Image: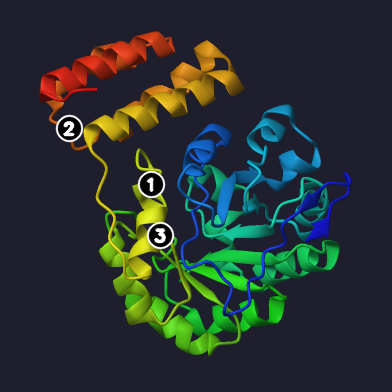
Amino acid sequence: MMKGKNGKRAEKLDISHLRLPPVVAAPMAGVTDYPFRLVLRDFFNGLAFTEMLSAEAVSRQNPRTMQMAKLDGGITGVQLVGSEPKTVAKAAIIAEGWNPSVIDINAGCPDPHVMKKGGGAALMKNPVLARKIVEAVVEAVDVPVTVKIRSGWGEVILKELSEEVLASGAKAVTLHPRLARENYRTPADQMRTKRFVELIDHQMPVIVSGDVKSEEIAVELLEKTGAQAVMPARWMRGDPELPLRMQKALEGKQRKSPTPVEKCRWLLIHARHAVDYFGEEPGMKRMRKHTFWYLKGIPRRSVPSNRVNKMMSVKELEEICRQVLSNLGERT
């Protein structure tokens, strides 16, 4: 355990080879906010991240960013993105006061708005700068520091990246094996991950990212790449139980996929958390996209899309769920 700057105690994550959790819930902008993570915690007690936070905004203590930064009381990581070592280090010092279990540096986000400012995957143009940012944060805080990268900008540079990561002082690295210029329609090349793990040569844990879609794929990726953990991302949207099912699969156990009734129940719990945290109107506006994610896989004719796009209250969502389940012939 460690004591934060506000006097409260937080669980310090042991990310040695034996204690790195086998499943790590990814940070996702606009998704892994506080209400989402409260639902996630009903199933999953492993490492989960906040949304990606702008280091510049954290250093200025921007109110909206501070709202995004609320931790959930579990083993929680804070992910920072920026392009200037001093600014990211300053933000990390502030973030350490929130008592996170780990601070992660994002050098892999391909969002154009992030890369335009030199952060995220733009750092794959300059791996030395990425290392300097990680070094500055490691020097500034006591909490373990990790880094998320891609396999390069326009070409694969795994050897150079492995050298810079190992020299940075990071305790673990997440590799998303697509290049920064490759979009999500390009399959993630996990042979790059396998090669990267070989280059790291057991000197630090490697977390697999990219197309971690299912329990079966999670098991397969760890077997094929030699990495220590998997990081599901987009596939958690509307399925907060997925990390738990992956964890069980890696233990050799099976857990049934959720039924429409269960998904609707989780959706309503999520909506109530969102309303409690953001207020009814802003919370329910946020829940519109989540509703479609929760109901993914249900025939479109059974989902009243127009009502979802206009809903403004939990009561309306309750009625939508009843209609969906009735259309499916399910009992609540």
Q: Amino acid at mark 1?
A: Glu
**Residue under pointer 1:** 241
Residue at 56% x, 71% y is 20
Seen in the picture, residue 25 relative to 290 is either above or below; the reply is below
Q: Quadrant of residue 313?
A: top left
> The N terminus appears in which quarter of the rendering?
bottom right
Image check: 284 left or right of 99? Answer: left
Q: Quadrant of residue 58?
A: top right
Decide: few, some or many residues near mark 1? Use Cα within 10 Å; few <14, some 14-19, many ≥20.
many
Characterize the local packing of mark 2: few (<14), some (14-19) or many (20 or more) Cα atoms within 10 angstroms.
some
Q: Which residue is mark 2?
A: 298
Between marks 2 and 3, how big is the CA–CA gap? 33 Å
- Are dots 2 and 1 in contact, CB under 8 Å? no
- Residue 31's tag is none
Disc 1 or 3, which lies upstream in sequence?
Answer: 3
SS class of the residue under badge 2? Answer: loop
- Mark 1 and mark 3 residues within 8 Å of each other at the beta carbon: no
Gap between marks 1 and 3, in whole Å? 31 Å
**Residue 207: x, y in percent?**
49, 70
Say which residue appears at 45% left-offset and 23% top-offset.
271
Q: Amino acid at mark 2?
A: Ile
**Which residue does the image show at 14% across and 22% down from the upper left?**
302
**Residue 181 disc label:** 3
x and y percentages locating residue 315 in the rendered image: 39, 9
Question: Mark 2, mark 1: which one is toward the viewer?
Answer: 1
Q: Give me the C-alpha separation between circle 2 and circle 1.
A: 18 Å
Q: Residue at x 38, y 75 (%)?
A: 222
Task: Name the side, left or right, on which 121 lies relative to 235.
Answer: right
Mark 3 falls on what kind of element? loop
Q: Is residue 308 above or below residue 162?
A: above
